[in-house]
Image (cartoon, grey):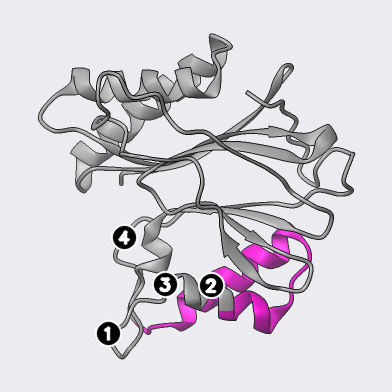
Amino acid sequence: GGDWFDYVDNPEGGWLGVADAKGRGTRAAGLAAVGLGAFRAARHGEMRLAQAGRLIHETMVEVGDGAYLRGVIGRWHGPTSTFAWITAEGPPPLVVDADGRLGQLEDGVNPPFGHWEDDLEPEVGWRRIAAGERLVLYTDGLTDRRRASGEPIGVEGFRAAVRAAAPTSAAATVRALEDAVVAASSQPLDDDATLIVLVPNTPTTRTENGVVGQRP
């Protein structure tokens, strides 16, 4: 399908992203591969995050035929537990606090890659992730999952899941969200679904899963 995720610990910083390409089937898979390739090329080229976003956009434009990619790309700075990101019309990153409250990171919002204006200077969000908080990146195949009533789970479904399960680790948070999505309907998932959760060990040390980064 058209979803991808990437997570790499580079010497100069950690890079991560989730994205969903236009359409379905082999064309969506092809667009996803092209977008992921551009993201990795930006990382290998040691670009700043805004430059990486611009490269993904330009790559989609070169593909043509209205190609676009929605998602979030980001950099993680482990020593200070800070996250910088660009949201390209994908679901915004979520943060679950130590008390189980879930909120959206509303900064860093831009059009989808492939639909930027030529002179767009992408907005980059930046936030410290405190001890006890969890950072969640995902694609809308999860929140668009429909209950038996026909209503989508939505972010409210995620909020209820983490409040009920009260998870504290990355693995437990993934499990709580996955369980909520699966339990919502007896039907199989009809869209790609991708989920990443990061949890800092302490405010000033490496993360639970070892990602390191720096402010772009």
Kindly identify the amino acid type of the residue bearing the numbered disc 3.
Gly
- Single out the mark in the foreground, 4 or 3: 3
* Extent of the magenta region: 160-186
- Single out the mark in the foreground, 1 or 4: 1
Write down the quadrant of residue 61 in the picture.
top left
Distance of label 2 from label 1 (alpha carbons): 17 Å
Question: What residue is shown with label 4?
Answer: 191
> Is residue 169 magenta-colored?
yes
Q: Residues within 10 Å of mark 2 (few under 14, many from 20)?
A: many
Disc 4 secondary structure class: loop
Nearer to me, 188 or 140: 140
The C terminus - image quarter: top right
Write down the quadrant of residue 77 in the picture.
top right
Question: What residue is shown with label 3?
Answer: 154
Question: What residue is shown with label 1?
Answer: 150
The answer to whether residue 105 is above or below residue 167 is: above
Question: What residue is shown with label 2?
Answer: 158
Distance of label 4 from label 3 (alpha carbons): 14 Å
Disc 3 secondary structure class: helix
Point out the residue furthest to the left here: 65
Drawn side of residue 63 relative to residue 211, left or right: left
